[in-house]
């Protein structure tokens, strides 16, 4: 087989595998956390920080990592990122204290931020335009498979070998991805196009994103009216304003003007943020309803949500075909309308098959938006800025879920009234939550119809 034939295939495999290792890592950890807590004698707050530290590092550094990839090469960043991700995983598996686990999870987030934008940029650099849509669909399906398989795989690993096994599996996967990446040949970006990296702008961007994500993650405990929430949002706003002012005067801004002026790219970012917010906000509420309201165990509740996962996986190639036939605008608007209507449908609890049908519509709509917006982001990225655009895309996919869950949690009466009888308090509380929180989540998703209408017709 010729080298020319190997390049696109290796790039696609490296992109898919890199996306899957991150998606899988997040879901298997959720299953491993109780065993981790017991083994290391950690508090609940400390265990939560094993997820929070990773999320903050990723959200803060994704755009910066994409900028570095545009300057130094995405193949190089992907290799460094995935090998560092594997090394941090090995360190966590050997850690004897929760403090070291948290620190290494933050380091794992740094390397995760390096590899994620590079996986998209490789597709943009190696694959021809007529094959991008199919590649994005394959990548989207693979992420769905990894996310769905995570709890099952994690449960099996923890049951037989303990929580450390969920990190050990990252090591051979990282080595395979790095080897695949080394077989890819991509055009070199001229150094003159990226003379230097502005550390001040990068620090402002990282601080603003970290403050925002940390604040949103705390809303379920603090509420929207809490002092910490207000101060966190104010700090995020001030840092964001300082960043905008600094970027306007910078000769080498972190986000180049060519990116901010691209309507398809900026519209896709807004669309991904609102759609992911709608999906995760809805799942947050539905999970409480199934387990707290209906009294189902976690496994049964997960099986109830299986139609969502199946349609996310199976719907990707259908969405790719629809994208080629209908164009980005009509495909995205149709998908976003499906998300909005499905979230509203979930606000009225029905039978198991009715809930499954609505979740299937939600999964299909979300996948249509994901394939369309990601394809537009990758295909319309200005030359030399594929990494920055990929970083922005992944940032939207990190901030969106935090925003959606914050909107839902802020309207959910998670603590039942003291006057309610213990035997009956769960169902009325979650019924009220469904009726209050899900319409607000649907409204958040409906905002995505605006950027969807701004995407290209063809």
Image (spheres, grey):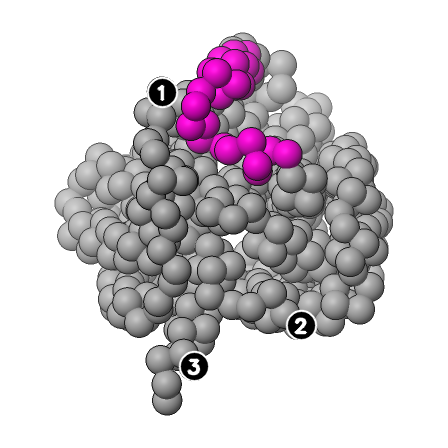
Q: Give x and y (percent) for residue 147.
A: 51, 60
Q: CA distance from mark 3 to mark 2?
A: 23 Å
Quadrant that contains the N terminus: bottom left
Q: Which residue is mark 1?
A: 200
Q: Are circles 3 and 1 on residues that touch, CB within 8 Å?
A: no
- In the picture, the disc for residue 46 is none
Q: Is residue 87 visible?
A: yes
Which is closer to the viewer, label 3 or label 2? 3
Neighbor class of circle 2 (other Cα within 10 Å; few <14, some 14-19, many 20+) is many
Q: Magenta region's main secondary structure?
A: helix
Q: Position of residue 128 (x, y in %)?
A: 56, 68
- The secondary structure type at the circle numbered 1 is helix
Residue at x-position 45% and y-position 38%: 63
> Which is more toward the observer, 455 or 161?
455
User: Residue under circle 2?
Assistant: 317
Q: Picture coordinates of residue 391 (x, y %)? A: 48, 43
> Mark 3 sits on what residue?
5
Among numbered discs 2 and 1, the one appearing first in the sequence: 1
Secondary structure at badge 2 equals helix
**Residue drawn at (60%, 33%) of the image:** 260
Q: Residue 131: image x %, image y %? A: 59, 71
- Camera-near label (2 vs 1) is 1
What residue range appears in magenta? 234-261
């Amino acid at each position: 087989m010729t080298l020319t034939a190997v390049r696109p295939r290796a790039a696609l495999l490296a992109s898919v595998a890199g996306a899957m290792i991150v998606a899988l890592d997040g879901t298997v950890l959720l299953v491993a956390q109780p065993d981790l807590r017991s083994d290391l004698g950690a508090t609940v707050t400390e265990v939560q920080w094993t997820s929070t530290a990773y999320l903050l590092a990723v959200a803060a550094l994704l755009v910066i990592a994409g900028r570095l990839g545009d300057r130094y090469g995405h193949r190089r960043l992907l290799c460094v990122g995935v090998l560092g991700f594997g090394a941090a995983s090995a360190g966590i598996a050997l850690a004897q204290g929760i403090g070291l686990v948290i620190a290494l999870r933050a380091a794992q987030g740094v390397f995760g931020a390096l590899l994620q934008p590079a996986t998209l940029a490789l597709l943009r650099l190696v694959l021809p335009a007529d094959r991008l849509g199919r590649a994005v669909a394959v990548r989207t399906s693979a992420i769905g498979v990894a996310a769905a398989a995570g709890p099952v795989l994690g449960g099996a690993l923890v049951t037989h070998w303990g929580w450390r096994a969920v990190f050990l599996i990252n090591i051979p996967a990282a080595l395979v991805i790095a080897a695949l990446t080394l077989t890819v040949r991509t055009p070199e970006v001229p150094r003159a196009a990226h003379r230097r990296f502005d550390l001040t702008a990068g620090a402002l961007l990282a601080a603003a994103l970290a403050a925002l994500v940390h604040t949103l993650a705390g809303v379920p405990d603090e509420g929207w009216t809490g002092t910490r929430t207000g101060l966190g949002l104010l700090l995020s706003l001030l840092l964001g304003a300082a960043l905008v002012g600094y970027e306007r005067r910078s000769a080498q801004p972190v986000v180049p003007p060519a990116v901010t002026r691209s309507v398809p790219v900026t519209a896709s970012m807004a669309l991904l943020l609102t759609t992911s917010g709608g999906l995760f906000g809805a799942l947050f509420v539905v999970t409480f309803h199934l387990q707290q309201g209906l009294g189902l165990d976690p496994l049964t509740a997960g099986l109830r949500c299986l139609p969502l996962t199946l349609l996310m996986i199976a719907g990707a190639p259908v969405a790719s075909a629809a994208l080629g036939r209908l164009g980005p605008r009509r495909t995205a608007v149709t998908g976003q309308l499906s998300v909005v209507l499905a979230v509203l449908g979930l606000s009225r609890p029905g039978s198991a098959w009715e809930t499954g049908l609505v979740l299937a519509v939600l999964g299909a709509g979300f996948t249509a938006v994901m394939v369309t917006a990601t394809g537009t982001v990758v295909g319309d990225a200005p030359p030399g800025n594929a990494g920055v655009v990929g970083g922005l895309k992944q940032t939207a996919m990190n901030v969106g879920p935090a925003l959606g869950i914050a909107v839902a949690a802020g309207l959910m009466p998670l603590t039942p009234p003291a006057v309610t009888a213990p035997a009956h308090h769960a169902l009325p509380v979650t019924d009220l939550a469904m009726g209050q929180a899900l319409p607000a989540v649907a409204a958040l998703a409906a905002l995505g119809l605006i950027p969807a209408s701004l995407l290209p017709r063809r």
